[in-house]
Image (tube, helix red, strand yellow):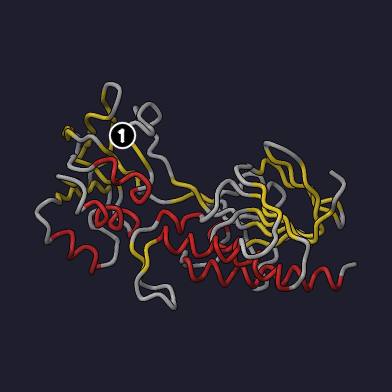
Amino acid sequence: MNQVYDVIIIGAGPAGITAAVYAARKKMDVLIVTRDIGGQASWSGDIQNYTGYQFISGPELALKFEDHMRKFDFKIKENEEVTELISNNHVKLIKTNKGEYRSKTVIIASGKRSRELGVPGEKTYKNKGLTYCATCDGPLFTGKDVAIIGGGNSALDAALQMLKIAKKIYIIDVAEKLKGDEIMQEKLRANKKVSLFNQYRVKEITGDVFVKAIKIEKEKKVQVLNVEGIFVEIGLMPNSDFATGLVKNKIKEIKVNQYNATNVPGIFAAGDVTDVPEKQIIIAAGEGAKAVLSAFHYLNTNR
């Protein structure tokens, strides 16, 4: 393909979609390359801290983002995974699993993916009782006993979502105390469905065709919990592997300055894939706006 876009946006979560909307208003020639639309926002349960919405669910907010984006005539390449990013002077080459695209600037807004447990049985039972998204898959476990791995806000959010769905909920966390918001902890501790297992490590996931049990360990004592569903909520990893020429921190987040610029001229990054502190939907959206305004300024001063 010989076309050279003004900007290619990698990812269509809150940061990528906001960047695209701002780019459209600047009359930039935009291409969006993304695995999905909505990003992590679509995984969230109840959202009560996004300005303008006193209460909205993650999937609802993600749909509103998408509806806004589709008001503009964007070129969108969905279900594509970026495999390589090459900067050649003023032209950037994006390689995906389906094609190649060229642009004068790039905004990386590829977000994060779920961190895996790395224990026996995890890969075997992935999507067979083991999942990384309570919002997506929770209803599949109606009336069943489930385990939620993790102790941060994402784990507690998953547990709260499952209160009206599951029969029994086990929260398993390696830390001595849960780290999520106190108000969420209070709601869970007050519910008889919930049992907490602090300072336990997951050793193995077992079953037949589907998940049947999880083995956990504390001080060399192994315990087996009979469950039919497991939600892994132990954190996220940035989707930055393709960006080999960019400076990253120790957890592979892309380093950016206050203008969302990376160490490579013409390449910007926004949202959870960056080292910007605090990973929130509203922050990602704001960073997406900043990134595209910086890209627009770059185009006007580097022609």
The single residue placed furthest to the bottom in the displayed view is 52
Task: Give the camera-side residue of 59 and 199.
Answer: 59
Residue 227, compared with residue 85, is above or below; it is above
Residue 225 in the image: above or below residue 149: above
In the rendered image, the residue lying farthest to the right is 303
Q: Position of residue 196 (x, y in %)?
A: 17, 50
Q: Residue at x 28, y 45 (%)?
A: 139
Which residue corresponds to the image point at 62% horizontal and 65% vertical from the top-left?
Answer: 71
Please, what is the three-letter code of the amino acid marked with disc 1? Gly
Tell me the residue at 19%/46% (across/down): 166
Q: Residues within 10 Å of mark 1 (few under 14, many from 20)?
A: many
How many numbered badges does the structure rendering display?
Answer: 1
Name the outermost residue toward the left: 192
Residue 20 drawn at (x, y percent)? 66, 64
Secondary structure under the numbered disc 1 in the rendered image: loop
Q: Position of residue 179 (x, y in %)?
A: 29, 60
Horizontal side of 85 relative to 228 (left or right) equals right
The residue lying at 77 percent from left, 70 percent from top is: 27
Task: Please tell me in which quadrant of the rendered image residue 218 appears.
Answer: top left
Q: Is residue 157 left or right of residue 251?
A: left
The C terminus lies in quadrant = bottom right
The image quadrant of residue 154 is bottom left
Q: Which residue is mark 1?
A: 129
Near-viewer residue (143 or 214): 143
Identify the image quadrant of the N terminus. top right
